[in-house]
Image (tube, rainbow, N blue to C red):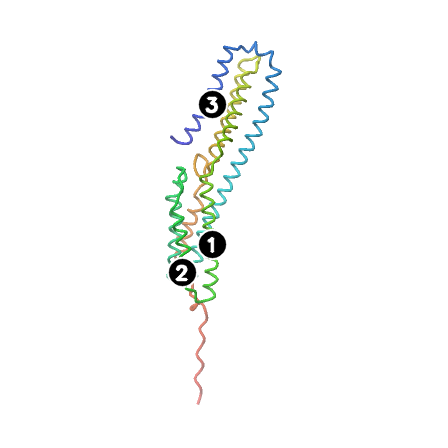
Amino acid sequence: MSYLVESVLIVTGTVCGALLFMVVLNHFWPRERRRMHNDLIGWQLSVLGTTYAVILGFMLFTVWTSYGAATVNSDLEADAALNVYRVAQALPEPQRSQLQDLARAYVDSVLSNEWPQMDRGEVPERSSTIATEMWKTVLAARITSATEINAQDHELTHVSELTKYRLTRIVQSTDKLPGVLWCVLLIGGVLTIVSACMFGSDSNWLQMLQVFSFSLLIALSLVAIADIHRPFSGLVHVEDYPFRRAQEQMKKWSGVVMPTPDSSQPQASSPPAPRD
């Protein structure tokens, strides 16, 4: 079942359940008899509604902030992988080719394997092995010039950043809201809808509209929180565009050849032959 169909069913079920509860309540406790308690019910509805609105707003802000952080982290991770590929061109062989192959394999693995795994709630492991190979390859380079020393230093920095951003992505993909917060959200929503149903209104259709609006808004908010709090799965999820962009950039850079330290230095001219 798709995430969209699942969300629509949850919202529809919540609204229908609230309206059905109001119909049953009107049958066993007519609204004419509840009208004398409107002062107490209205005060209760006002306090519950205000408190629950603050909780919903805070939770939506929290999950949206986490979603934005996951988006930025994915962009930084893709840039780090691209930088590993670019800086590797200043290293000697065979580390140059090995690092570029590892950078391409890393991006390909994230796109083809890890993104679908995170969507299913699984913990990806393939990129961790590739990152470990990057460390070994950079440290195994035999440096012979100042340019290569500088390149190795930058390469170690980029590999370190890549590892850090990958670990952050894994944590973000597995992190979820605690169960106690879901209890607060669900119980608060039920109490708010029940309080709206208990109000004794003069117009039955007006009260039905009120209950419909309350239940629809609460259901939509809960569905949004449930979908956004998992930034790499669900209807709203972090896109893999940064890694596809890095993949395209690597293809463009594959034809660029960096000059070697020997060839980049001007050749000293031979001294003129002595004259007789």
Which comes sooner in the sequence, label 3 or label 2? 3
The three-letter code of the residue at mark 1 reads: His
User: Residue 268, percent across and down?
Assistant: 45, 75
Q: Which element carries disc 1, helix, strand or loop? A: helix
Residue farthest to the front?
180
Q: How crowded is mark 1: few (under 14 residues within 10 Å), some or many (20 or more)?
A: many
- Above or below, comparing residue 99 to residue 202 in the picture: below
The three-letter code of the residue at mark 3 reads: Thr
Q: CA gap, disc 3 to disc 2? A: 61 Å
Residue that carries the numbered disc 3 in the rendered image: 14
Residue that carries the numbered disc 1 in the rendered image: 158
Q: Which mark is residue 255?
A: none
Residue that carries the numbered disc 2 in the rendered image: 140
Q: Residues within 10 Å of mark 3 (few under 14, many from 20)?
A: many
Q: Residue at position x 39%, y 39% from top?
A: 122
Of tags 3 and 2, the one toward the viewer is 2
User: Residue 33, percent across and down?
Assistant: 57, 9
User: Residue 8, percent across and down?
Assistant: 44, 27
- Above or below, comparing residue 163 to residue 186 in the picture: below
Q: In which quarter of the image is the N terminus?
A: top left
Does the residue at mark 3 contact the one at mark 2 (Cβ under 8 Å)? no
Q: CA gap, disc 3 to disc 1? A: 49 Å
Q: Which element carries disc 3, helix, strand or loop? A: helix
- Above or below, comparing residue 25 to residue 122 in the picture: above
Q: In this view, does 31 lie to the left or right of 276?
A: right
Which comes sooner in the sequence, label 3 or label 1? 3
The residue nearer to you, when weighing 138 against 183, is: 183
